[in-house]
Amino acid sequence: MKWVSTRGKSPAVPFIDALFAGTAPDGGLYFPDRFEPLPASTLASFRTADLVDIGTVVGTHLLGGDMSEPDMRAIVRDALDFSIPLVQVADRAWVLELFHGPTLAFKDVGARVQARLLHHFTDGTPLTILVATSGDTGSAVADAFHGVPDSRVFVLYPQGQVTDVQEAQMASLGGNITAVSVRGTFDDCQHLVKQAFADDEVRKRVWLTPANSINLGRLLPQVIYYFLLARLEGELTISVPSGNFGNLTAGLIAKRLGLPVRRFVAATNLNDVVPEYLRTGTYAPRPSLRTVANAMDVGAPSNFERIRAMYDDSIERIREDMVGAAFDDAAIVAEIARVHRERRYLLDPHGAIAWLGLQQQLEKHPRATGVFLATAHPAKFREVVEPAIGARVPLPAALSDAIARPRQSAHIDVDYPALVDLVIR
Ligand SMILES: *Cc1c(COP(=O)(O)O)cnc(C)c1O
């Protein structure tokens, strides 16, 4: 199997090269050159299979011979050691809860598998991962690599501008994880990281590896959990709360591999570039707006390039598989309150958007089997959820433990040599 660029102007590469690349040389994103559907008997076996079995089969299939089944099983078992429950919330409607990993957000799935894939393909050469974060991605990446042999992680975050919980999640791990508090903004952090990746002197000393969300190692593991939906009857309508559209891209790949999905709902907050495109045919990326579902505050979704490439840039074909839906903060908060009151189910703002998008489709298609993805634990967004429901949301043990642990961050100014000192030490 070969991996090609969405822009078609770079040579096809083997998986290992695509895995360690950021973008392709032509600026595009890597993608498989073809999708081989899974055999019907395999899909049928998923009705009763568990997450590790499904992950082993789907992962091995996606890598097309680049990894043995026992190796894939070891990675999946170690990475996905938490549950992903499928819970019924209404007649013909289910929620897939993706937020039971160590940082209580769905990014744990991609980041934890990615960390182990990178380690598998390095044969013991030490890796240095450098990421800038405004909060959530950094904590998922830091946690994912914590304790993975031969890897060191530096997470740069703007001092005083991440939440207490997020800082605790990054700065209390220790070991191979260094939290770096930068006296500057998120953009400063990103700029420092970019400088390092462009610095040949640094790259001679350490093997710098990107761990961002456009990377295949993050994207492909997300295909796995869609196959947990194989146990539901009927043709699926799946609503995905979307920001950079990695999650939804993974769903479209699952459909190509044979999951019986009738339609996806691209559910967003007011950053509705993709719903607008589906409605009007015009794709107009723009600066992001701040919303209560801030992990989805993305105005130029990076993975949308992969979606367009998968459909040969035909909006008619994209519309066959996808509808859009967008909701403002007031609708999100009201829905969190209503679902809590009427169904005793607690949504976080991102899950609320997906649920709102699903209901629109279930009204139009009452016989559909509906599923929405819940991407964050409601306790991670207490500032929004607690006023909405008028009650406290208890912190799960994973968060209260992190808050109680001692923290240690390196502190630097927006000063590139200071970062280099840390990284090559
Ligand atoms: C990152 C994130 C999203 C958006 O996922 P994409 O793959 O970028 O579309 C949704 N919800 C939460 C909680 C997230 O952290």
Image: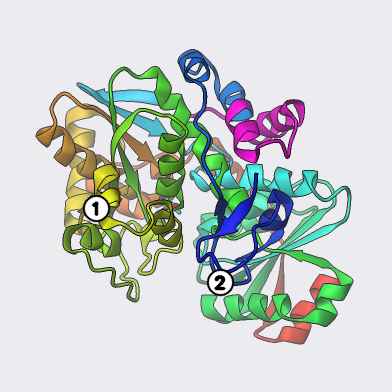
As shown in the figure, which amino acid type bears the numbered disc 1? Glu
Provide residue 410's location: percent of width, then percent of height. 73, 70
Residue tagged 2: 27
Q: Nearer the viewer, residue 409 or 124?
A: 124
From the top left corner, tell me how far across and down residue 262 is, in percent. 27, 33
Percent across and percent down for residue 7 are: 50, 66
> How far separated are the C-alphas under marks 1 and 2?
26 Å
323 or 129, which is in the foreground?
A: 323
Check disc 2 and report its element: helix, strand or loop: loop
Q: Quadrant of the C terminus?
A: bottom right
- The magenta span reads 57-85
Q: Secondary structure at mark 1?
A: helix
Q: Is residue 346 magenta?
A: no
Name the residue: 80% across, 80% down.
200
Contact, CB < 8 Å: mark 1 with mark 2? no
- Whether residue 298 sits left or right of residue 339 in the image: it is right
What's the colour scheme?
Answer: rainbow
Does the segment drawn in magenta span residue 69?
yes
Sequence-first tag of 1 and 2: 2
Is residue 83 shown above or below 130?
A: above
Dominant secondary structure of the residues highlighted in magenta in the image:
helix
Q: Is residue 99 left or right of residue 387?
A: right
Where is residue 146? Give x, y as percent. 73, 48
> What residue is drawn where x is 46% and y is 52%?
246
Is the distance from the Cβ of mark 1 to the nearest ligand 1 atom less than 8 Å? no
Residue position marked by numbered label 1 in the rendering = 316
Q: Amino acid at mark 2?
A: Gly
Give the residue drawn at x 24%, y 62%: 277
Between residues 215 and 90, which one lies in front from this camera angle? 215
Seen as rendered, the residue at the extreme left is 364
Q: Neighbour class for label 2 at 10 Å: few (<14), some, many (≥20)?
A: some
The residue lying at 17 percent from left, 48 percent from top is 334
